[in-house]
Image (tube, coloured by chain):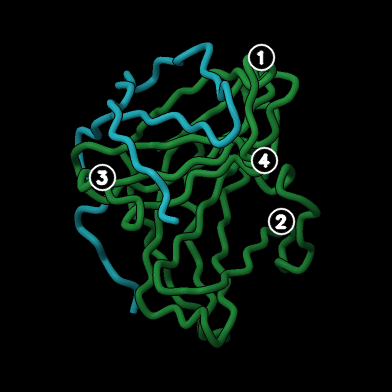
Chain colours: A cyan, B green
């Protein structure tokens, strides 16, 4: 038996702003969010020799 | 990035999370688990985790309670994500220990996010040590959060110590998060 997958929209996050009142209302429930980073954090990678 | 879970309901254990990159594939992402509660500098009892976002763009965190249960009440919480520009450590290998790296004191600055990349760390066969130190004239070090990300490893044991010889390991996750 394969798990059932249902598409759902992600809740958009505003960086730095708390989202109150989040909940897990039932067993196996999850919450999906989305946000965008404004820049890469791994530019100028310098591997250690 | 810094993820914080606060105002947790009475039934809520630790919050686990996973982070997918812009592809939406969680298999290409990172864990964001909140392994234990601690008091942040704002005096709140919180759970938190950190991650390095390798590229600019969309990310998708997915949260769930680590007991996989839930209820109409008791599992509530607040959720916030913060991002900070980070800088790379200038790690240097010590001469007397092949897998021991030192982050120079001037590089480690409180209040900043910093990361260290080592492509030659043979964590599969030999333990590695990263030593952080700070000048005593600066702000005291507290609330250090560390994430170790080793994509090809199957098992990583991770411990923090705070004495000069790096011999005394902290006792639990909560204290590790507050170092």
Q: Are marks 2 and 1 on the same chain?
A: yes
Looking at the rendered structure, which numbered label has been put on residue B67? 4
Q: How many marks?
A: 4
Identify the residue shown where x is 35% and y is 34%.
Answer: B84
Q: Nearer the viewer, residue B90 or B37?
A: B37
Asked which secondary structure carries label 2, the reply is: loop
Screen quadrant of the N terminus of chain B:
top left
Q: Are marks 4 and 2 on the same chain?
A: yes
**Relative to B38, does residue A25 appear above or below in the rendering?**
above
Q: Nearer the viewer, residue B129 or B65?
A: B65
Q: Chain of mark 1?
A: B
Numbered disc in front, either 1 or 3: 1
Along the polypeptide, which appears first: circle 1 or circle 4? Answer: 4
Looking at the rendered structure, which numbered label has been put on residue B162? 2
Residue B54 locus on image (x, y percent):
27, 51
Task: Look at mark 1 in the image and give the residue it sits on.
Answer: B73
> Would you say residue B96 is visible in this rendering?
yes
Identify the residue shown where x is 26% and y is 45%.
Answer: B24
B63 sits left or right of B177 in the view:
left
Numbered disc in front, either 2 or 1: 1
Query: Label 3: how many residues lie within 10 Å, few (<14), some (14-19) or many (20+)?
Result: some
């Amino acid at each position: 038996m394969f798990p059932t997958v249902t598409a759902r929209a992600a809740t958009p996050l505003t960086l730095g702003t708390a989202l109150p009142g989040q909940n897990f209302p039932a067993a196996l429930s999850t919450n999906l969010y989305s946000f965008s980073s404004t820049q890469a954090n791994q530019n100028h990678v310098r591997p250690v020799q | 990035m810094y993820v914080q879970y606060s105002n947790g309901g009475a039934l809520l254990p630790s919050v686990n999370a996973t982070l997918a990159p812009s592809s939406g594939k969680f298999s290409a992402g990172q864990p964001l688990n909140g392994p234990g509660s601690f008091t942040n500098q704002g005096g709140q009892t919180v759970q938190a985790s950190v991650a390095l976002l390798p590229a600019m763009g969309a990310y998708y965190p997915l949260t769930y309670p680590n007991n996989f249960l839930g209820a109409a009440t008791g599992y509530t919480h607040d959720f916030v994500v913060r991002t900070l520009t980070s800088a790379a450590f200038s790690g240097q290998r010590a001469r007397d220990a092949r897998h021991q790296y030192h982050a120079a004191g001037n590089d480690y600055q409180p209040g900043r996010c910093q990361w260290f990349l080592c492509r030659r760390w043979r964590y599969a066969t030999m333990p590695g040590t990263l030593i952080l130190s700070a000048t005593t004239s600066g702000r005291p070090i507290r609330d250090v959060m560390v994430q170790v990300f080793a994509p090809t490893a199957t098992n990583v044991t991770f411990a923090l110590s705070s004495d000069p010889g790096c011999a005394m390991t902290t006792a639990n996750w909560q204290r590790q998060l507050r170092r």
